[in-house]
Image (spheres, rainbow, N blue to C red):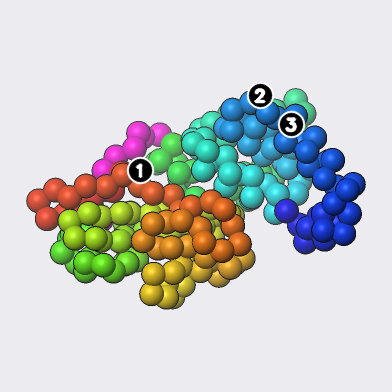
Amino acid sequence: MSDALNYLLKARPDALGHYFAFLKDAGSHLDPKTRNLISVITKVHAQTERGFRQYLGRALREGCSSMEVLDALLMAFPALGLAKIIWAVDIILDMNIPGFAPEALTSPGQWHDVMANAAVKDGEVTRTECDGRGLFVYREKKAYLVYDSRCPHQNTDIPELALKGGTLTCPKHQWEFNAKSGDCIKKGNSPLKRLDSKVVKGRLLAFW
């Protein structure tokens, strides 16, 4: 939500509250994936880049696949037209989201060899790169939690320098996360995306 909308919501909650209540109620019979895909399309129609990035992130968090997002844009071609779809895809490419890479679109998910499990110290969080994807790994004894390094707000790739103790702070809008649980603890309300993981013969593997 923009700073202006935040301001109006605080200054005139009596007026703006009705608007947001209407939006919430209007989608109450839709599943979260469908509701967010529709929001993505409306942001593309209005060519609101900030809103598009935000709702694209929400759609992906709700379980939408990259192909579902692309299909939604193409199905809306009669309303959007080619120019706006290209505008949206240019933004997606600029965001460099791993799931939209051509090889990711044409092949099913697979297990990736992240690192030697012994390289992650017990009780600590480590950032690493694997096959073009940034990851944060937390180890607690024999349990390993692997998180995508991208902030769920607008898919900003959170760097290693953003890790202070057990807290991650996204450099773009200062969302803060508990790097051990993945929970968002300040500003936002969406957790880091956790990836399935396992240890096989001394190697930590993650699935995407």
* Percent position of residue 173, x then y: 62, 65
Q: Quadrant of residue 125?
A: bottom left
**Which amino acid, by three-letter code, is at mark 3?**
Asp
**Which amino acid, by three-letter code, is at mark 1?**
Trp
Q: Quadrant of residue 109?
A: top left
Is residue 109 covered in magenta? yes
Element assignment for label 2: loop
Q: Which residue is mark 3?
A: 25
Residue 149 sits above or below residue 87 on the image: below
* Percent position of residue 181, x then y: 38, 57
- Residues drawn in magenta: 106-114
**Which amino acid, by three-letter code, is at mark 2?**
His
Q: Nearer the viewer, mark 1 or mark 3?
A: 3
Task: Looking at the picture, tell me which residue is in the foreground, 74 or 13.
Answer: 13
Sequence-first disc among 1 and 3: 3
The answer to whether residue 135 of the structure is visible from this angle is: yes
Query: Is mark 1 in CB contact (under 8 Å) with mark 2?
Result: no
Q: Which residue is mark 1?
A: 208
Query: Is mark 2 in CB contact (under 8 Å) with mark 3?
Result: no
Q: Is residue 4 left or right of residue 139?
A: right
Element assignment for label 3: helix
Task: Looking at the picture, tell me which residue is in the foreground, 195 or 28.
Answer: 28
Sequence-first disc among 1 and 2: 2
**Residue projecting furthest to the left:** 201
* Percent position of residue 80, x then y: 75, 33
Measure the C-alpha gap from mark 1 to mark 3: 34 Å
Q: Which residue is mark 2?
A: 29
Q: Residue at x 64, y 50 (%)?
A: 54
Q: Nearer the viewer, mark 1 or mark 2?
A: 2
Q: Is residue 130 left or right of residue 157?
A: left
Q: Quadrant of residue 132?
A: bottom left
